[in-house]
Amino acid sequence: MPIKTTAARANSLTFSTERLLSAFRDALGNGGEMRRPGAALADSAEGIDRAALKFIQVTLRTAGFSCMPVVNETVANGLAAYYEYVAVQLHQWVDPLSNEQFWRKPYAYGNSAGHLVLHVTGNLNYYIGARVAETGYRRDRDREFTDKQPPPKDEALRAFDRAMAMVVATIRKQSPTDWGKAYTAEREPEAADRFQIFLRCAGHAYHHVGQIVYLSRELART
């Protein structure tokens, strides 16, 4: 059934539903992203009058398709910058520690700064590395806290830096539609999509940086 629209000049123009839907399909790239905003529509609108073309363009802009690449870049830049900030903060507090201090518990309870670094590293390698980037990482979460023969401090920090670099690289690879892809992982019932797991892992990492700050200050006093 033809769809009827009225141009600004009050001229009645008609175009078919089939042509309208075809224009939408041709104008959109994979996942609803404009291949070439504006130009893509013009190339694909053969046989559709100007009023129909204007309707499609306005509808796409209203739905947000024309700004999706910009939003994606903003999200990626913001998340990547935050992870890099967390890494800088962690190094600020653990770099001055000796290897002995790095692995020592200043309290009878709790963890050492070193074991918290192992934990954050394992968390990122599993939840983002294995479950998003598909690195094949296999996690032993308990060992992150109980390893009786942990690696030297420098080795542990290099592993942490590699995990952070992997996270940032993975963030940069996400397309506008990747953020909403379904997500599942062990011990993670709350993150339903990729965006949520990136957000939750960032918060988790900075939470433990806060603990490391407290431990480092206590170690400096003793």
Image (cartoon, helix red, strand yellow):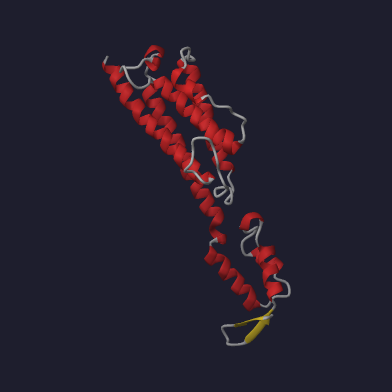
- Residue 22's place in the image compared with 157, above or below, is below
- Residue 40's place in the image compared with 167, above or below, is below
The part of the image, by quadrant, that contains residue 28 is: bottom right
Q: Position of residue 57 (x, y in %)?
A: 59, 69
**Depth order, front residue of 157/205:** 205
Q: Residue furthest right?
A: 47
Name which residue lies at 43% across and 33% down: 205
In which quadrant of the rendered image does the N terminus lie? bottom right
The part of the image, by quadrant, that contains residue 133 is: top right
In which quadrant of the rendered image does the C terminus lie? top left
**Depth order, front residue of 208/175:** 208
Q: Position of residue 34 (x, y in %)?
A: 62, 59
**Depth order, front residue of 194/29:** 194
Instruction: Count how many numbered circles sit on residues in the image.
Output: 0
Q: Is residue 73 left or right of residue 34?
A: left
Q: Is residue 20 left or right of residue 213?
A: right
Q: Position of residue 76 (x, y in %)?
A: 51, 45
Q: Residue furthest left?
A: 221
